[in-house]
């Protein structure tokens, strides 16, 4: 029996390729996300981390997401991502500047729920806030936001008496010390913060909720088009197959129910920081308080 040496060589090459060590073919690409190991117990990071894992898994590509080593300010975190210095993915509220410096994955990871803001107040001020009659009376009170948070500019542009602070802990201290009257916090953030600061005798104000369209995106380095595309593909698959909804409700279902948004007075604000590329017309990407998702 004659064997064509060329065909035999081709068969051997195919067999060697198929039988090569899996580690050489499937070594996961490490992706560092901006939530340090020291903050692993902080529940504010649990959902975006789980969603990032889900999106990368659904993308069909081989990735290994890992936490960053060091806790940094938001400014320094975004700067490191921009310079491609040890951080591959950040989740944060969008702004024109951030979208120019970085590459956003244009799917709001929390369905815009970060733009639904309950008012964190002192428990003894409950009746005071119940008796507020309109937006003007609320705007006359003093509030606060983080110095480098887009929310600071949004509230200021809508006429709120907004001061700023570079200290996350310090803003709660200022509320407790009566230096401000309330601290707007998103539906997704407030439950964990009430637990973390339970000694401060704080509560969510009855009656009111602020709303402005806001987007919390995954951001990657401007040049990392493949990672951005893989995350977007994974997110869209997770939306289509219902796994993102399941994860969203697992983390926020109880907080949404407790917030009772359909029965609150909604103050709708303008967000001057939205860019024209914000996917406002893709209604399936956005939270609907009547549906609870």
Image (cartoon, grey):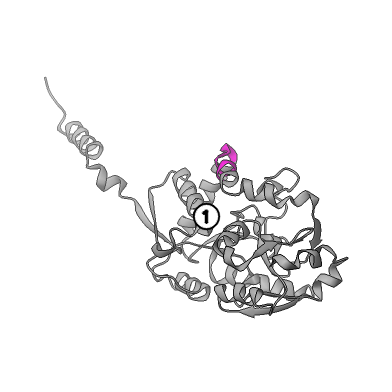
Specify whether residue 245 is painted magenta: yes
Rendering coords of residue 196 (x, y %): 54, 62
Number of dots carrying numbers: 1
Q: Residue at x 84, y 68 (%)?
A: 135
Specify whether residue 58 is painted magenta: no
Q: Is residue 222 above or below residue 244?
A: below
Per the picture, the main secondary structure of the magenta-coloured stretch is helix
Tell whether 275 sits left or right of 13: right
Seen as rendered, the residue at the extreme right is 133
Q: Residue at x 39, y 70 (%)?
A: 70
Q: Residues within 10 Å of mark 1 (few under 14, many from 20)?
A: many
Rendering coords of residue 140 (x, y %): 81, 76
Q: Residue at x 34, y 50 (%)?
A: 28
Seen as rendered, the residue at the extreme top is 1
**In what quadrant of the picture does the C terminus appear?**
top right
Tell whether 283 sits left or right of 52: right
- Classify mark 1: helix, strand or loop: helix
Picture quadrant where residue 290 is located:
top right
Looking at the rendering, the stretch of residues picked out in magenta corresponds to 240-247
Which residue lies under the disc numbered 1? 48
Q: Nearer the viewer, residue 243 or 2?
A: 243
**In what quadrant of the picture does the N terminus appear?**
top left
Q: Is residue 150 above or below residue 216?
A: below
Rendering coords of residue 56 (x, y %): 45, 49
């Amino acid at each position: 029996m004659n064997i064509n040496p060329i065909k035999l060589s081709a068969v051997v090459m195919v067999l060697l390729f198929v039988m090569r060590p899996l580690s050489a073919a499937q070594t996961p690409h490490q992706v560092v996300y901006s939530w340090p190991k020291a903050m692993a117990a902080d529940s504010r990071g649990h959902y975006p981390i789980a969603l990032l894992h889900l999106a990368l898994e659904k993308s069909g590509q081989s990735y290994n997401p890992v936490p960053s080593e060091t806790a940094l300010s938001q400014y320094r975190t975004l700067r490191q991502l921009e310079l491609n210095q040890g951080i591959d993915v950040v989740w944060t509220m969008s702004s024109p500047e951030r979208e120019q410096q970085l590459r956003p994955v244009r799917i709001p990871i929390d369905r815009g729920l970060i733009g639904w803001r309950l008012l964190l107040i002192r428990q003894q001020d409950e009746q005071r806030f119940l008796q507020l009659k309109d937006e003007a009376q609320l705007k006359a009170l003093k509030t606060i936001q983080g110095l480098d948070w887009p929310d600071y500019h949004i509230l200021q542009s809508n006429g709120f008496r907004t001061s700023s602070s570079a200290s996350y802990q310090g803003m709660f201290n200022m509320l407790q010390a009566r230096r401000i009257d309330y601290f707007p916090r998103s539906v997704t953030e407030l439950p964990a913060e009430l637990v973390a600061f339970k000694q401060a005798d704080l509560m969510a104000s009855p009656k009111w909720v602020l709303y402005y369209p806001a987007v919390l995106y995954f951001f990657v380095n401007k040049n990392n088009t493949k990672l951005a595309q893989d995350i977007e593909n994974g997110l869209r698959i997770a939306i289509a197959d219902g796994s993102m909804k399941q994860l969203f409700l697992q983390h926020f279902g109880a907080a949404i129910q407790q917030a009772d948004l359909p029965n609150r007075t909604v103050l709708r604000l303008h967000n001057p920081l939205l860019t024209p590329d914000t996917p406002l017309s893709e209604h399936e990407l956005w939270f609907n308080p009547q549906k609870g998702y």
